[in-house]
Image: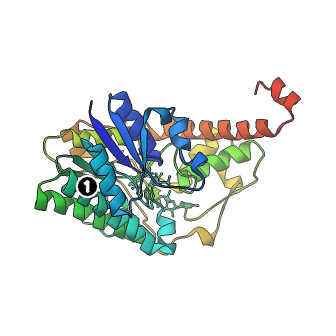
């Protein structure tokens, strides 16, 4: 049975990747950082119904000794480094923490692989944010990077260290340059989930408006379930390499709002307000990926359309909020609505 170690297992991608690898017959281990709110930490893994099928081991990406200990305990065949301070907006407020986890944290994992278990195959979660102020209208593996945030700069460091460990030490280290990918398990602070959650609240009468920042930016959004499949495919190749993963379609935040509100039968213009507090010090205006190499070499293509993903996300948020409303009803009323 193949063994996989996932850092960031409690995040969106970690949860979907764990589910995917379990379905493939893997033994899955996850690095779990200690939290005083342990009961909410595994929420995504519980939502997917996989939490009891994994082994979670205490550690922290910024603590090399814990990463070394886990690597020697598990001796995984595959290591997926997904842990990060992943929110761009927060990276201006916490640039050092972002550098230390998103950047240096990756090197802790690379060092643990090199020192303890160099036969392991390593995946680094790189990001399309590295293209930042885009140097080509459609971005591929050949497009020069121009990071526009502390997050993107930290990801670039981790990306180049992955390339460097491959070239210096012969590690099977690959980097996936993933464009934005979303799902019902996306963090609520990211714009897609903030919008679908807002749609559900407004539809159910729990909110009257939704405050957003820049509506003009465009993103190439795919579904996380499709993107974790690409990660696993990269580690199955004989030769390690770097791949762009994207849908090839870019959509503005404004059009995303129109789709999500429209799905619920609402006109977005009536509810969306913009606030200068939500604008960023430097913006990434457009991201639009070319995943031609992933298609040719890995045989990877996305299976979920943006429309299907929006529908899944709005439905999930409606169900969550309906559940919360039901919980607040008196017991007799709950029985009538079948709770
Ligand atoms: P999430 O923010 O949902 O998950 C981040 C994970 O990292 C969580 O499990 C979090 O744990 C963990 N983590 C944070 N700090 C530490 C630490 N010090 N030690 C151990 N674990 C830590 O991110 P996603 O799942 O969306 O993304 C996965 C990776 O892919 C990230 O590296 C992200 O930057 C990158 N990426 C994501 C894209 C996207 O569109 N989703 C696009 C391109 C790249 P906890 O639950 O305890 O907070
Ligand atoms: P990012 O591409 O990793 O930064 O993903 P986000 O989902 O955080 O942001 C995507 C785009 O949406 C960026 O251009 C943001 O400026 C824009 N955006 C507009 N309003 C908001 C908002 O309220 N929250 C977030 N997170 N992004 C917003």
Residue 197 position, x and y percent, is 63, 47
Q: Is residue 156 above or below residue 247?
A: below
- Name the residue at 61% across, 36% down: 315
Residue 80 position, x and y percent, is 32, 48
In this view, the residue in front, 26 or 206, is 26
Q: Can the viewer see residue 191 in this picture? A: yes
How many marks on residues?
A: 1
Mark 1: C-beta under 8 Å from nearest atom of ligand 1: no
Q: Is residue 155 above or below residue 11?
A: below
- Quarter-of-image position of residue 86: bottom left
- Name the residue at 55% across, 55% down: 35
Residue 113 position, x and y percent, is 23, 54
- Name the residue at 47% across, 49% down: 11
Q: Can the viewer see residue 223 in this picture? A: no
| Quadrant in which ligand 1 is drawn | bottom left
Task: Give the image's coloring scheme.
Answer: rainbow
- Name the residue at 33% across, 61% down: 65
Considering the image in quadrants, where does the N terminus appear?
top left
In this view, the residue in front, 160 or 109, is 109
Q: Is residue 269 above or below residue 200?
A: below
Q: Is residue 263 left or right of residue 59?
A: right
Q: Residues within 10 Å of mark 1 (few under 14, many from 20)?
A: many
Q: Secondary structure at mark 1?
A: loop
Tell me the residue that label 1 is attached to: 140
Considering the image in quadrants, where does the C terminus appear?
top right
Residue 147 position, x and y percent, is 35, 69
In this view, the residue in front, 162 or 1, is 1
């Amino acid at each position: 049975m193949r063994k996989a170690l996932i850092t960031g297992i409690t995040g969106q991608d970690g949860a979907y990747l764990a589910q995917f690898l379990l379905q493939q017959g893997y033994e899955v281990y996850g690095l779990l950082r200690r939290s005083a709110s342990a009961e909410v930490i595994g929420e995504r893994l519980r939502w997917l119904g996989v939490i009891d099928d994994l082994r979670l081991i205490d550690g922290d990406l910024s603590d090399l000794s814990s990463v070394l200990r886990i690597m020697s305990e598990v001796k995984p065949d595959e290591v997926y480094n997904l842990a990060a301070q992943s929110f761009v907006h927060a990276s201006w407020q916490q640039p050092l923490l972002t550098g230390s986890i998103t950047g240096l944290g990756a090197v802790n994992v690379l060092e643990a692989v090199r020192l303890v278990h160099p036969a392991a195959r390593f995946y680094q979660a790189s990001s399309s944010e590295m293209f930042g102020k885009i140097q080509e209208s459609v971005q591929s593996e050949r497009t020069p990077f121009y990071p526009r945030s502390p997050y993107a700069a930290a990801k670039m460091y981790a990306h180049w260290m992955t390339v460097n460990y491959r070239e210096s030490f012969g590690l099977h280290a690959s980097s996936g340059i993933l464009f934005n990918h979303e799902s019902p398990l996306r963090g609520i602070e990211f714009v897609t989930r903030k919008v679908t959650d807002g749609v559900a609240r407004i539809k159910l009468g729990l909110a009257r408006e939704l405050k957003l920042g820049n509506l003009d930016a465009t993103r190439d959004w795919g579904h996380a379930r499709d993107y974790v499949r690409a990660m696993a495919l990269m580690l199955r190749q004989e030769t390690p390499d770097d791949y762009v993963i994207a849908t090839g379609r870019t959509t503005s935040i404004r059009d995303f709002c129109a789709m999500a509100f429209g799905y619920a039968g609402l006109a977005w213009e009536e509810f969306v307000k913009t606030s200068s507090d939500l604008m960023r010090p430097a913006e990434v205006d457009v991201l639009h990926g070319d995943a031609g190499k992933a298609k040719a070499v890995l045989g990877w293509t996305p299976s979920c359309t943006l429309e299907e993903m929006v529908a899944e996300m709005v439905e999930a948020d409606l169900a969550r909020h309906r559940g919360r409303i039901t919980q607040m009803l008196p017991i007799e009323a709950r029985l009538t609505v079948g709770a």
